[in-house]
Image (cartoon, helix red, strand yellow):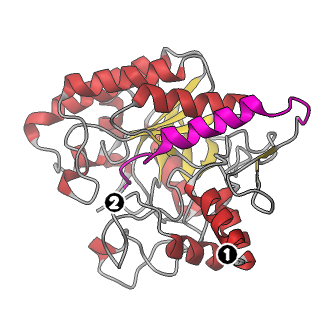
Amino acid sequence: MNGSRGAGARASVAVVGAFLLFAGCSSAGGGGDKSDGSGGSGSKITQQPKNSDPFWVNPAGNAAEQVAAYVKAGRTDDAEQIRKIAEQPTGEWIGTENPEQEARGFTEAAQQAGRAAILVLYNIPHRDCGQFSQGGAADGNTYRAWIDGVARGIEDRPATVILEPDAILHLVNQCTPAQFQEERYFLLKTAITRLKSLKNTKVYLDAGNAGWGHPDQIFQPLKQAGIDQADGFAVNVSNFYSTQDSLAYGKQLSAKVGGKHFVIDTSRNGNGPYTAGKAEENWCNPPGRALGESPTTKTADPLVDAYLWVKRPGESDGTCKGGPQAGDWWPEYALKLAKASD
């Protein structure tokens, strides 16, 4: 309904481990903003300028690997298109099995590059109301243990956390079964408290998008979930609404939750939302979309802490419109997003 989120960082621990091994064995002399991907000459992945974009670019992510594959195949034009994705920081979606190891791997790699990791936590029980990204932790105790694992992995390293896409919206629209709603509020509040106990972690609770409804419907649930303890909220996660519309929505909502700041997911909003299909399906792998504004902390409004690419462009929303499983890399779609942003 609001955008399938992906199943987390598939094989992330392995690639982060490989990056850390490389970094540890490299010469200490360079000091620049370049980080090697796995593809050798012609496929190196570069960090963005820290003064405008302090977030970590994963040099071993799916897009970086695709750049290397295209270079090897002689598809240099396509490699340069995918580089538009590979050289931007994107959210690392923490998986269910090894949260401590994944969070530690990402934040250590980011710290070595002098950057902050963007982590997405998407494991609330009864997640996604049975849609493409259904699942989540088995129960509240399992979820709290998972959050604690993430926190142990982050420690005092810099991290920006996007907390539980859709979790609040699915309370508001009653998609989450009534018997689990009180527990969800408690789990979200507990997660915020645990994560904010960390020295250098920022937490933004997901707050929907400009096309979902009116801020009047969501501000009280945000308060009940502990938004007062968080750094702010996130809008447009995995969706396509324009930055302008997202800014207007976020400012209205901010005014109702004590002036909290917010971040906007601009990863795929370059052409705005798709409106030609069925309304209930327009969020899932829509055609004709484009990359949005690059991640940065230099935004159009002081209430907006950052434009982020929370959703990793090129990863499927789900098995719709010919797409693979939610969260799987889809190079053809990634290429279309990149080319449409020219």
User: What residue is shown with label 2?
Assistant: 2
Q: Which residues are magenta?
A: 5-30
At 75% from the left edge and 31% from the top edge, which residue is drawn? 25
Disc on the earlier residue, 1 or 2: 2
In this rendering, the answer to whether 249 lies above or below 118 is below
At 38% from the left edge and 20% from the top edge, which residue is drawn? 148
Amino acid type assigned to the residue bearing label 1 in the image:
Ala
Q: Which mark is residue 265?
A: none
Residue 159, visible in the rendered structure: no
Question: Which of the 4 quarters of the picture holds residue 218?
Answer: top left
Closer-to-camera residue (269/223): 269
Amino acid type assigned to the residue bearing label 2 in the image:
Asn
Furthest residue toward right: 29
User: What residue is shown with label 1?
Assistant: 73
Q: Secondary structure at mark 2?
A: loop
Q: Position of residue 184 (x, y in %)?
A: 23, 32
Distance in Å between CA atoms under marks 1 and 2: 37 Å
